[in-house]
Image (tube, rainbow, N blue to C red):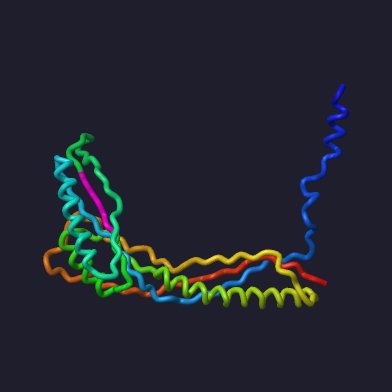
């Protein structure tokens, strides 16, 4: 029988951890740095909605209103605009399809808050506001993170030195390190999703940017040296 040979081969196989380097006196730690940054990017979503019996006619009406909104947004310098979801849904009454609802939205954003506020006021003459919110622009976020990365790494090094000294050692070796960033986004504030538009000359919405916390965390492992 060949079974004893099979058992011998299994016993001779090396353990899975045989090639792993030995681990001695490793400590895992983390440090962070954060700062408040002014929200400078205003983001708004507006939509057009039509209800009725003829889906084609409803779609044409929605497309016309959205196209006009896009054209108005494109006339404002430094405003980015793009279309969002387009939906055609049945409207039920007494468990039967009684009509159709067509909806489409656009998203506009800019760091020019005054221009955005005025534009939103104009767009509300034909579109309804779904949400408005502030966040930190990519450029300002990157600049803040670059500053905080240096602070967080310095804090990590200082903490590693203190831990090393507390264990009675004089030096350490960096084993691995990870840098993570988060924060800086304020969720858009939703509005009542009513398919109605504001009257001509309606005042623009009152807006306050506020600030957001940008945070950088450095985590990793060190190996204490003799």
Count all numbered tags in the image, as a single digit.
0
Residue found at x 69% / y 65%: 221
Quarter of the figure that contains the C terminus: bottom right
Q: Is residue 168 above or below residue 23?
A: below
Quarter of the figure that contains the N terminus: top right
Percent of width and height locating residue 202: 15, 68
Q: Residue furthest left?
A: 200
Q: Quadrant of residue 12?
A: top right
Q: Is residue 208 left or right of residue 59?
A: right
Q: Nearer the viewer, residue 191 or 141?
A: 141
Please provide the residue range marked out in magenta.
101-106
Q: Is residue 110 above or below residue 53?
A: below
Q: Quadrant of residue 184?
A: bottom left
Residue found at x 55% / y 74%: 33
Q: Quadrant of residue 23?
A: bottom right
Q: Is 90 part of what is drawn in magenta?
A: no
Percent of width and height locating residue 206: 25, 72
Residue found at x 42% / y 71%: 139
Percent of width and height locating residue 86: 27, 48
Percent of width and height locating residue 78: 29, 70
Q: Is residue 171 left or right of residue 30?
A: right
């Amino acid at each position: 029988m060949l079974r004893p040979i099979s058992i011998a081969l299994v016993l001779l196989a090396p353990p899975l951890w045989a090639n792993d380097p030995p681990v001695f006196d490793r400590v895992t730690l983390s440090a962070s740095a954060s700062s408040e940054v002014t929200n400078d990017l205003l983001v708004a979503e507006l939509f057009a909605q039509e209800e009725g019996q003829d889906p084609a006619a409803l779609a044409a009406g929605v497309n016309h209103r959205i196209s006009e909104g896009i054209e108005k947004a494109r006339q404002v310098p430094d405003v980015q605009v793009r279309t969002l979801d387009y939906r055609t849904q049945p409207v039920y009454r007494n468990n039967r399809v009684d009509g159709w609802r067509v909806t489409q939205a656009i998203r506009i954003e800019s760091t020019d808050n005054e221009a955005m506020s005025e534009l939103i006021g104009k767009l509300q003459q034909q579109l309804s506001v779904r949400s408005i919110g502030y966040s930190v622009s990519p450029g300002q976020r990157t600049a803040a993170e670059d500053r905080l990365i240096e602070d967080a790494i310095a804090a990590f090094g200082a903490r590693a030195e203190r831990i090393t000294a507390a264990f009675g050692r004089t030096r350490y070796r960096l084993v691995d390190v990870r840098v993570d960033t988060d924060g800086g986004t304020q969720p858009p504030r939703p509005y009542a999703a009513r398919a109605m538009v504001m009257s001509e000359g309606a005042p623009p919405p009152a807006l306050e940017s506020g600030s957001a916390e940008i945070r950088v965390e450095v985590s990793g492992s060190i190996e204490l040296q003799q």
